[in-house]
Structures are given as C-alpha cells and as structure tokens.
Amino acid sequence: MLKMIQAAGRVIWASTDSLTKWIQVIALCIAAGWTFTNYSVADKPSLEPNISVDANLITDNNGWEPGTCIAKYTTTLANEGKVSFDVKEIHFLAWRLDTPKAKAQEATYVDSQEFSRGELIVDQPIRSSPILLKHYAPGQRAHQDFTWILRRQKPGITSFTVEVGAISGKRRASGYGQGWSKDICSEPATTQGAMLNPIQERPQK
C-alpha cells in the first residue's frame, strides 16, 4: 500500500501546479489514513475465524449395567464468521467436586470456573470424528453426541467442559462450552434423562 501511495504522489507532483499539488497530496494522505483505519477497525477483525460452541449435558442415572450411569454431552460447532476454518481436535474434560455450600449472607455466588478444581475424571482429546473434525465454511454448523459410562461416586457436582480450536491459515481461534450436574451416579435414579441448562461459552480469544 505504501508503494502505491508513493507512486501516486510522484505522478501528482509531476503533472500539476504547486497549490494543486499540495491539495491533492493532502487529500491522498487523508484517504490513505481513512482506508487504513477502516480496514483495522472494520474489515480486519471480520477476517478472523469465529467459532461458536454450544454444549448440552444430559444424564441418566440408570446406566446400562448395575452401578453405572450415563452422561451424554451434545456438542454443536458453528462458523459464525466470514472466513472458513478447520477444526482438527476437540478436548473433553470433566471434574467431580463437593457441592458448594451456602455462606452466612443471604445470597452466595457460585463461580462455575471453580468447578475445574475438583477431581479430574475425564481428560480425553478427540482426534477422529468426520462429523465435527472437518472444514467449516461461513454459516456451516455440525453437532455430535459424546457418551461416557460413569461408575457410582460420592454426591457432588460433576462438571464437563469442551475446548475447540479453529485454524484459518495462520489465524487461530478457540471456543469453549460447559455443562454440569449435581449428584450424577450418587444413587439410583427416580427419573431418567434429567436435562441440564448449559452454561454459555466463554469469550473467544
């Protein structure tokens, strides 16, 4: 861009009178500045990969065999940007921790980020999945169910997360989803398929 501006300036300087030269040079500088600012503020960010992750956890305390339960984690990926990207790996993590306790004040804030400080029970990268691990054009989305069989455990919170990376040329972006449930596999279920409200994804890097 700089070379183009310099070349245009030389042409203007050689073919016009002095006052007109300066007017046109100033106008050219203003136009170049506006173009660069508009690109930096509006166009350049839109060329970054923009991945959306929607995660939904469903549990069934009546497992396929005695002493087990089922955790099904539905993950949906979508390209919300203007450029295509590739997803080559997704990573699942899950923790079990004691149920948070209410403090003396009337309302106690529960930080879901603290749910990753318990006992790690799942640490599984997925590197083979034709459904999710593929090329995503703008607007394209896909979803897949991932299932775990869990053994009986102490009452508490079980928290699942999924981390997804997108690659577009040299640009990278990441998405994140989280879902949690109370007392998975802690006792025989009275109902099946208790659906959880998923926690929204954290901001993209």
Image (tube, helix red, strand yellow):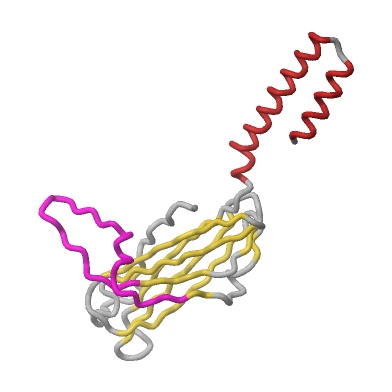
Asked if 198 appears above or below 133 in the picture, the reply is above
Q: Position of residue 35 (x, y in %)?
A: 68, 31
Asked if 139 appears above or below 61 in the picture, the reply is above
Q: Nearer the viewer, residue 40 or 160?
A: 40
Asked if 172 appears above or below 162 in the picture, the reply is above
Residue 177 among magenta residues: no
Q: Position of residue 72 (x, y in %)?
A: 42, 74
Q: Position of residue 29 (x, y in %)?
A: 71, 23
Horizontal side, residue 130 vs residue 174: left or right: right
Work out which quarter of the rendered image holds the N terminus and state it: top right
Asked if 179 appears above or below 146 in the picture, the reply is above
Q: Position of residue 114 (x, y in %)?
A: 29, 61
Q: Residue 132: which quarter of the image? A: bottom right
Q: Residue extending furthest bottom?
A: 66
Q: Nearer the viewer, residue 36 or 114?
A: 36
Residue 100 among magenta residues: yes
Q: Residue 190: which quarter of the image? A: bottom left
Q: Nearer the viewer, residue 197 or 22?
A: 22
Q: Residue at x 48, y 70 (%)?
A: 91
Q: Residue at x 74, y 23 (%)?
A: 28
Q: Nearer the viewer, residue 189 or 146?
A: 146
What's the magenta region? 95-124
Q: Residue extending furthest left?
A: 104
Q: Residue at x 31, y 91 (%)?
A: 66
Q: Residue at x 86, y 13 (%)?
A: 16
Horizontal side, residue 74 vs residue 6: left or right: left
